[in-house]
Amino acid sequence: MGIQENGNGGVLKYNRMDSDGMEEDVAVLCEEKRNDMSSRKYVLVCAIFASLNSVLLGYDVGVMSGAIIFIQQDLKITEVQEEVLVGILSIVSLLGSLAGGRTSDAIGRKWTMAFAAIVFQSGALIMSLAPDFKVLMIGRFLAGIGIGFGVMIAPVYIAEISPTVARGSFTSFPEIFINLGILLGYVSNYAFSGLSSHINWRVMLGVGILPSVFIGIALFVIPESPRWLVMKNRIDEARLVLLKTNENANEVEERLAEIQQAAGHVNAEKYEEKAVWRELLNPSPGVRRMLITGCGIQCFQQVTGIDATVYYSPTIFKDAGIKGNTQLLAATVAVGFTKTIFILIAIFLIDKVGRKPLLYVSTIGMTTCLFGLGLTLSLLGNGSVGIKLAILCVCGNVAFFSVGIGPICWVLTSEIFPLRLRAQASALGAVGSRVSSGVVAMSFLSVSRIITVGGTFFVFAAISALSVAFVHKCVPETKGKSLEEIEMMFQNDRPQQGGELELEDVKHLMQTQ
């Protein structure tokens, strides 16, 4: 009996130990889950605040599409001046993008975003008070420089603070906020169009200053990039940031070691600005592939005509047969809503489906919609059917843009370059984007006058078809890889390998949608 009791006692004791162990395991899992949720929320807040500069860009793009109608009436500007006013912001922003890389390496990612907001504020204020075209252009020049800084640094900062598994979603935030800004610009056009033509466009442009208030608040919330801190040999500060943005201490130490290893070459070789640009201008095969991918996707994002669609949507709808400024601006609000909704869809899919399948869906869909818009404007203009099809094609084009190449272009650019080159190479990609945007915006009216609006969209459709081939040949899949792993992938392997397999993933994506 005693032995039996001892045996039972042993069994009971064993069971209690097993239960305690299970409880401890559950407790550990729950704690890790809480840490994971806490870190995700922290990175989410940082990504939102870092993306506020993008609202400024989007708002300017959206509001100018309607404000230009009333600027033309008030200041009596010519069609050429209208094109220059609209397109110069993208051209000038390349100056900010070029300077952004060096500035962010010198003063940090965080304070570069603050500087961008201050410069843009100054430009927006001058534009809203401008008495003539010359002063308006001065404000536009300053706003463009501020936007150049902002669009370059936000994706870099977010990529550097985000955990690997969610980096794609978080790095898409700037594009989301650009779309939100465009929508707010369209709504502002519609809301203030009833004022006199001397006042309404000034109010429209002046409202763009308001987001800068939240940017000021953001500076007291967001941390500096851990990778920049490591580059400056501020290891302890980088560790503290990583502890806030990652779920467990072991992963923090692993990530810190990877960053130190990547940054070690920078510090050991004492890379200076000239050395970085020398490497970019005379690249190794791996860096050359990175530049082709990064700069190429940035240019294709713009030369497919998205800014022409957004800036000149009233012109497009007028050519389709819509009459009256109020009706034109109301139609553009529908475009803004579509663009914003589909960028939210991209957020949920980018880290689940991957970058490349979304790019296939995006570029193929845009090609179809652009070709359809060209046919509609050429064959069915000035009728109710033509108007409905034109609105459908424009909304379809911005929807496919927002679900793929719009956000993913910035994600890829912030992911693929090594730490020592990331800021300057991202700036170079942003320059390609801004120049392409400026060329499209400054030539759309003139080209449309020569080959018609419909003919211009046939050209955009042809370019969009080329972007499908570019994605297949030159863009790798970066989903689920750390920034350091992506760098090694470009150095050791050709990124276009595996494109045939990834193309099959489009079927799965269609089923998911």
Image (cartoon, grey):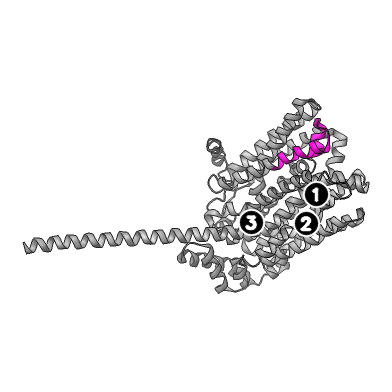
Q: Amino acid at mark 2?
A: Leu
Is label 3 in a helix, a strand or a loop?
helix
Inspect the magenta stretch and tell me whether residue 329 lies in it: yes
Q: Amino acid at mark 3?
A: Ser
Q: CA distance from mark 3 to mark 1?
A: 22 Å
In terms of sequence position, does the residue under pointer 2 or pointer 3 come before the other?
2
Inspect the magenta stretch and tell me whether residue 247 lies in it: no
Q: Nearer the viewer, residue 269 or 102?
A: 102
Residues rendered magenta in the picture: 313-336
Q: Name the residue beneath numbered marker 3.
A: 414
Disc 3 packing (10 Å; few <14; some 14–19; many ≥20)? many
Q: CA distance from mark 1 to mark 2?
A: 10 Å
User: Which disc number belongs to residue 310?
Assistant: none
Q: Name the residue beneath numbered marker 2.
A: 94
Q: Amino acid at mark 1?
A: Gly
Residue at (88% x, 47% y) in the render: 71
Q: Name the residue beneath numbered marker 1.
A: 438
Measured as percent of width and height from the top left, residue 187 is found at 74, 45
Quarter of the image for the N terminus: give it: bottom left
Check whether the beta carbons of the residues at disc 1 and disc 2 lie within 8 A of each other. Answer: yes
32 horizontally vs 471: left or right: left
Residue at (49% x, 67% y) in the render: 253
Q: Residue furthest front?
A: 195
Residue 140 is at least partly visible in this image: yes
4 horizontally vs 121: left or right: left
In terms of sequence position, does the residue under pointer 1 or pointer 2 come before the other?
2
Disc 1 packing (10 Å; few <14; some 14–19; many ≥20)? many
Measured as percent of width and height from the top left, residue 273 is found at 72, 68
Q: Quadrant of residue 110?
A: bottom right
Measured as percent of width and height from the top left, residue 512 is found at 53, 38
